Amino acid sequence: MKKVLICIDYNPTSEIVADAGYQLSKSLNAEVCLLHIIADVQYYGVQYPTFMGYDGFESEIDLNINKEMHSVAENFLDTVRKHLNDSQVETKVIEGSTADVILEYAFSWKADTIVLGTHSHNILEKIFIGDVASKILKNTKIPVYMVPTKK
């Protein structure tokens, strides 16, 4: 294995996913990329407590400004990179449908493993939209490393 793609969202459980994926990549002596997808801007307005050193927002953000959202997401990934204490970790922010973007980017980046957390945001999302991890497992040929995040 040479490349491990760690997919994280803006949720405190991402710390568990990032840490587990990073440990996997180090044990395999693999290259790492942290991928964050801007799919649903509502999660950026949530004030979670500080996690992985990321404090969230200090001021209100106009969620209609695309450039601002990318800046927030890039800041989040830079903070995660610092948390992992590895300046060699690549980061990538892409807009789109989460499962589709993960599958497309994993293929184009030539990932050997995709790392995902197993959480879902709510039961209605699972029923009407489907679970991102399920969609990825159903449509990928790349091995997937699932990290349980429920306590």
Image: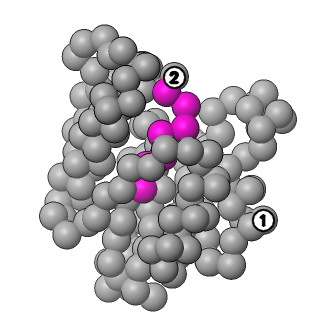
Q: Is residue 147 above or below residue 13?
A: below
Provide the residue designation for mark 2.
42
Q: Which residue is depicted at the point 74% across and 56% down?
A: 135
Quadrant in which the C terminus appears? top right
Q: Is residue 116 left or right of residue 67?
A: right
Task: Identify which residue is drawn at 78% across, 65% down.
Answer: 138
- Mark 1 — residue? 138
Q: CA distance from mark 2 to mark 1?
A: 27 Å
Residue at image x 44%, y 49%? 94
Residue range in magenta is 35-41
Q: Residues within 10 Å of mark 2 (few under 14, many from 20)?
A: few
Q: Report if residue 101 lies within the magenta region.
A: no
State the residue in front, 102 or 53: 102
Label 2–label 1 contact, CB within 8 A: no
Q: Secondary structure under badge 1?
A: helix
- Quarter of the rendering containing residue 33: bottom left
Q: Earlier in the sequence, mark 2 or mark 1?
A: 2
Report the residue at 15% width, 64% height from top: 87
Identity of the amino acid at label 1? Lys
Q: Is residue 127 left or right of residue 66?
A: right
- Left or right of 51? Residue 96 is right
Per the rendering, the mark at residue 53 is: none
Identity of the residue furthest to the right in this view? 127
Q: Does residue 37 appear in the picture of this structure?
A: yes
Identity of the amino acid at label 2? Gln
Q: How many marks?
A: 2
Residue 10 position in % (x across, y down):
43, 37
Counting from the top left corner in percent of width and height, residue 75 is at 24, 40
